[in-house]
Amino acid sequence: MISLKRTDSNDSDFLKLVVELDKELWEIYGDVQAQYAPHNKLIEIFPSVIAYEDGSPAGCGCFKKINDSTVEVKRMFTLKEYRGKGIAYKILLELEQLAKEQGFTTVILETGDKQLAAIKLYNKSSYMVTENYEPYINMPASICMKKEL
């Protein structure tokens, strides 16, 4: 059974999942990841969602406020052994709901060109490719997307 927990980016399960996400990104992108790592720091306390399967942390995501109407989805990740079960989709829907509840109307995100499953998820969830925004403007591996809630 999959359950979702709303928390913040200081949650210990969230932080463990983010460590695994960072490892995977370094495996996928190698040295190119060094350009992206500074933009993935959890400097602020972000609203976060953790998915659990039978009590074990399986995936996560969070968002940060960009302005009064827009949030950026960050740190979306599902552990390999839990993929293919719709967990990322459920996390994304919960993040969107949380954003709506807080009065936001637009969601943006950045993913990488080698993260085909993520691109497929975002397309399925009605995100549209948009021009790369800061700090991803001169990063050719970046794909930026946007959705109006």
Image (cartoon, rainbow, N blue to C red):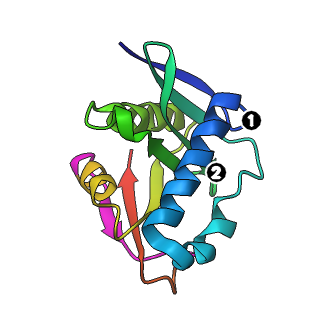
Q: Please say if 102 is above or below 120.
A: above
**Mark 1 vs mark 2, CA separation in Å:** 17 Å
Q: Amino acid at mark 1?
A: Asn
Residue 50 lies left or right of residue 3; in this view the side is right
Give the residue number, with chain letter if any, for mark 1: 10
Q: Amino acid at mark 2?
A: Lys
- Observer able to see residue 103: yes
Q: Position of residue 139 (x, y in %)?
A: 49, 82
Q: Residues within 10 Å of mark 1 (few under 14, many from 20)?
A: some
Q: Quadrant of the N terminus?
A: top left
- Observer able to see residue 63: no
Of the residues under marks 1 and 2, which one precedes in the sequence? 1
For the magenta stretch, what is the residue range?
A: 124-136
Q: Please say if 54 is above or below 113.
A: above
Q: Position of residue 112 (x, y in %)?
A: 41, 67
Nearer to me, 82 or 2: 82
Q: What's the residue at 53%, 29% (across, down)?
A: 50
Q: What's the residue at 28%, 53% (across, down)?
A: 117
Give the residue number, with chain letter if any, for mark 2: 65
